[in-house]
Image (cartoon, grey):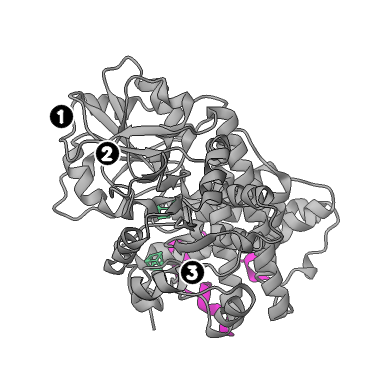
Amino acid sequence: MSNMFCYQCQETAKNSGCTIKGVCGKSADVANLQDLLVFLCKGISHFSVRLRDMGVESAEVNKFVTDSLFMTITNANFDRDRFVTRVNEAIDMRDSVRNLFISKGGKVEEITFEGAYWSSRDISVMEQKATEVGVLTTENEDVRSLRELTIYGLKGMAAYAEHAFNLGFEQADIYSFMQKALVDTTDDTLSADQLTALVLETGAHGVKVMALLDKANTTAYGNPEITKVNLGVRNNPAILISGHDLKDMEELLKQTEGTGVDVYTHSEMLPANYYPAFKKYSQFVGNYGSSWWRQTQDFETFNGPVLFTTNCIVPPKSSATYSNRIYTTGASGFPGFIHIKDRKDGKTKDFSAIIEHAKRCASPTEIETGEIIGGFAHAQVFALADKIVDAVKSGAIRKFFVMAGCDGRMKDRNYYTEFAEALPKDTVILTAGCAKYRYNKLPLGDIGGIPRVLDAGQCNDSYSLAVIALKLKEIFNANDINDLPIAYNIAWYEQKAVIVLLALLSLGVKNIHLGPTLPAFLSPNVAEVLVKNFGIAGIKSVDEDMKLFLG
Ligand code: SF4
Ligand code: SF3
């Protein structure tokens, strides 16, 4: 018998499933506790969905389910104690919504899902139960595939909903859908067709949540604008901030002002450099290092403390010298790292400990110099629309390649660097997410002043790419988004990429190529449906794909 089963990310063991320990470093007990937490969130949702039908909405449930799903995404949280606490809180939350449901005259006998009732505060009982409620409890592999595809989409959705929430933006139908969908994944009467429809509905809500987050980000911090981001360092102590949460970024910048401590971004926080509201801070220097999986090198030479606001954390090697300078906050966590508490009662987070820590550290060691250019989210691209349209009409731009998504540590991702290098000079790459680190420092040049790599921002800013595609459809008077000269060659790793993919499918985008491997959680039959209805395909060699895309 295996210790655990997880196949939610692209690096899953043997492209089949992690069964002993996660390739990501997640231990079996944490993997199982995550399964138990999701199981209890399904139980909570059974009551909250019915309560909503009775006109009762619970802000606590909405927040709890969202945060819990977020905590289970790949590389966000490895902290067993946090999950034990969370499971206990889930039982409390579930019991309180069940009592409320009963007090409103609800009939519990209508609910047969075990997660609506199971309870134990004994850690060994909890851990035993945690091994019995995972992915493999659904025996039919197609049903399991569709259920998990939905759940991974919901995890990505939860991450984006949480970032929007932190900026004061919420949307009731996103929460209600998340909970309804969780309940649907426990319904044995749903047919494969109904579950496929649920997957697409998940994608439609993915569009909504990304639109909401886009509104939250741009309302709070302005529209990203073309920016040359500094890659070099200064001679001051500094903090490196990673992950995706812009509210944390804002508060860290406010609190480091005038302290003599500089701030640099790492990995998915790079796009913070593109926002007008952040540029005004003189201690905000630029970006340090590369994508998430290179952190084991980048953190060594950074010399100062690092703040994780979300994924992706790589467990440090025992020889790492930086382990005692890592802080987490929000949904992220790792045993031994210092966790900065959430905001309470309208107050900001308190980053004083990490700022004081920075003052005791040496300034960063320079690992590169120069600049990279980014900030091509929808508003900035619309501002350049005339130029871009002229370039397409004159033939100066032959084709756009959407190469958004995630990066990862596997060697086969060199494909994306080689693909970018092999693209003809009359093509433009549209990107978002950490996938960009595979080619954003290559000298790919520009086309009449338009850079050949247009970076819209974080993975959630893939929404911008969809908005840009829809705008081009309008400008070129195309009947179908698929008639545009845009090809999709997307790299995925974790569950946010799943919601981005489902969102693109729900917008009608076809023929997306997905790599470096197709998800292990797609059963052969489910994969066939995606191929047949949406033209989803994997990747081959750079040469073969180049011929295919450029015909
Ligand atoms: Fe394995 Fe990925 Fe799950 Fe980690 S998140 S345990 S690497 S499938
Ligand atoms: Fe990257 Fe983890 Fe997905 Fe936000 S930081 S794209 S992998």
Residue situated in front as seen by the camera: 525 or 353:
525
Asked if the residues shown at circle 2 and circle 3 are in contact, with their CB atoms under 8 angstroms apart, the answer is no
Q: Which of the marked residues, 3 or 1, is nearer the chain's N terminus? A: 1
Q: Which residue is mark 3?
A: 513
* Residue 449 rendering spot, x and y as whole percentages: 41, 39
Callout 1: helix, strand or loop?
loop
Foreground mark, 1 or 2, reads: 2
Q: Residue at x 62, y 63 (%)?
A: 482
Per the image, the residue denoted by label 1 is 362
List x then y, in percent, for residue 387.
53, 39
Residue 202, x across and y down, in percent:
65, 61
Element carrying mark 2: loop
Indicate whether 25 appears above or below 113: above
Label 1 and label 2: CA atoms lie apart by 15 Å
Q: Which residues are magenta?
A: 113-141
Identified by mark 3, the residue type is: His
The CA distance from mark 3 to mark 1 is: 44 Å
Q: Mark on residue 98?
A: none
Give how far apart the Cα atoms at labels 2 and 3 are.
30 Å
Considering only order in the chain, which callout, 3 or 2, is on the residue closer to the N terminus?
2
Residue labelled with disc 2: 288
